[in-house]
Structure formats: structure tokens, C-alpha cells
Amino acid sequence: MTTLLSERSRIFEQADPYAVSEYVNQHVGNHCIHLPPKGRSQASINHRTFSTLDLCRLSYGARVQVMSPALESIYHLQILLSGHCRSISRGEERIYGPGEILLINPDDPVDLTYSADCEKFIVKLPVRLLENACLDQHWLLPRQGIRFDSERRDLAGLDGFVQLMTLICHEAESGAGPEVQVLYERIVASKLLGLLASNVRRVSPDAEETGGFEAVRQFIEAHLRDEIGIEQLREVARVSERSLYLLFERHVGLSPRDYVRQRKLERVNAVLQLPGARSVTEVALDHGFLHLGRFSETYRKRFGELPSQTWRRRHEGAALNG
């Protein structure tokens, strides 16, 4: 099996599994572990953050059960490198071995049991990355969100995916710049949507409809700091209100208001990660979020963390690098 993340990315080696588990909770996804009562396990983890992806190579050194409620804002992709994993999801049990991929949807509870010799490579992908990739392809975004099928997946049938992840790990360890990282994460999202079965309808809208929606999309992007009303969007699209709702339903699976709110949240998230970004309150107010408590909760559901955490992580990183 190809090496994914070298020793340069080692965080813990032969360490207390509960310390490793706590690190995973902070960076990869909330969970709890159950280990055998006897014996002394030695866990190891390699980790890198790459744009909005988290890359992780992990072993617990003992038979371990990992449980978690639905992950909500992230997809969790695992490549089994050695050993075995038993997955129980929605009443179905599956056994995964080396060279197979396990992908956990955001609304799936987690109940995984790994063998003592199991090592896995994990990729954490935010929901919005997959949604944006779907929209970039002009595919129809499901209203209930993108869900990948629970079929067994062998890496031999996933053209070049491991090679892509190997390259990304190399770029992460070599200190690739933000522009390169964003490019690669988009390729990962597009690759997964193209390779794995999902509920995404790969239907290209009619040219006339695409033109109408594209004009509205560009208007929204240009006015994210403004109050955007239905009437404005209707005038830009040159359609009735009913047709406007149908246009949004067909293209993005959302109402016009929900789509505008989503794009505003995306812009706030991007601004908070810029060097010299002002306070969360100012950025939120600039984009029309007047009820800050409600805004913070909506932001957390979308990005898996509070806006203050996004801002703090960016500025703490800038201070360390400065």
C-alpha cells in the first residue's frame, strides 16, 4: 500500500490511545473510543491540515470501538491500510479490509470496530466543499444534501484516487501555498463525485435556464454585503416569482433565500480566514447577520465550528508565522 503521510507528519508515536483520541476530537471529528480493559495499547497518529481538508494516518495498537453521533458538517473518508474494520450503520454490518474505502455521510452515526493491527488513512472533507464541486459541475444539488451510497469500494476500481492523495500528502508536507491547496481540494471533491455512487443527479440544465440562473448567481456574488430580496432576483432573472423558485430548486435544490444565506455564510467564512480580518461581529454585520447568536449557531452547523474559532485559528497561525 502506498505511503500516505510520512514521519514528518508524526504527532504521537506509541502513545496513550486516549491522548491520541483527544487529538482526533480536536482535528478530525468528535468521537469516543472503547478499548479492552487489559493490556497497554500504543497508538500513533500522523496529521496535516491542507486547506479545508484534514489528512490523518492513525492506528490505536489494540482492538478499539469508535462511536460518534452524526458528524453533521463533514464527510469522513477512510482508506484501510492494514487490518480490518467492522462497520454497523443503520442496521447494516459490513467488514472492510486493506485496500477498501469506507465513506461516512454527515447524517450517519458512527459505530466502527477496528482490529488491533488496523491502520487507516482518514480524510475529513467539509460538506460545503462537495456542494460547491457539485454546483461547479452544474449538477443538481439534492435538497436533502449529498449522500454517497454505502456500497463496498475497492481502491483498484477508483482510478488514480490513491495517487492523488499521495500527491496531496506530499504537497502538504512540502508547505504548498494556499492557492495550490485550494486547487487540490477542489480536485478531490470533483474526483469523489465522479467516482462514487451518490444521489447527485448529473443532469446539465437547459442552456436557456443556465443563462438565467447564472445571471442571478453573479448578481448574488456581487451583492453579498447587501440585503438581497426576492423581487431583485426576479428582475435579474426576468421570470415570475414562481419560476424563480423553480429555477433555484432545479439548480441548487434550495430556495432563493436559503441559497443567499448559504453564500453569505461562505463569504463570512472566507473573510474570517484572511490576514488582518476584523472581529467576527463586524464581519457578520457587514454581511447582514444582525442576530449574532443565531448567526453563530447557523455558522457552526455549516462549518463545524464557531466563527470565533475560525477567526482565532487564522490569527493564531499568523502570529506563529510572524
Image: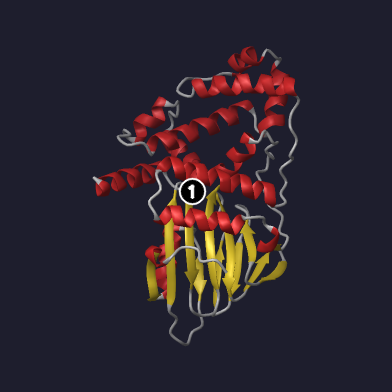
Residue 204 in the image: state x and y as whole percent: 74, 32
Kindly tell me whether residue 154 is visible in this rendering. Answer: no
Count of residue discs: 1
Whether 219 is drawn above or below 322: the answer is above
Residue placed furthest toward the bottom? 38
Depth check, front residue: 101 or 260: 101
Whether 95 is drawn above or below 266: the answer is below
Say what amino acid the circle numbered 1 marks: Gly
Residue 199 in the image: state x and y as whole percent: 73, 46
Choose top left, top right, bottom left or bottom right for residue 135: top right
Q: Quadrant of the C terminus?
A: top left
Choose top left, top right, bottom left or bottom right for residue 280: top left
How crowded pointer 1 is (Cα within 10 Å; few <14, some 14-19, many 20+) is rated as: some
Q: Quadrant of the N terminus?
A: bottom right
Choose top left, top right, bottom left or bottom right for residue 213: top right
Identify the element where label 1 is drawn.
loop
Whether 255 is drawn above or below 55: the answer is above
Depth check, front residue: 297 or 262: 262
- Residue displayed at 43% across by 38% down: 293
Residue 211 in the image: state x and y as whole percent: 68, 20
Whether 278 is drawn above or below 122: the answer is above
- Residue displayed at 71% across by 63% down: 152
Residue placed furthest toward the left? 322
Depth check, front residue: 243 or 177: 177
Residue 132 in the image: state x and y as whole percent: 58, 38
Q: Which residue is mark 1?
A: 304
Depth check, front residue: 247 or 98: 98
Kindly tell me whether residue 43 is visible in this rendering. Answer: yes
> How has the structure been colored for display?
secondary structure
Give the side of residue 233 with respect to residue 298, left or right.
Answer: right
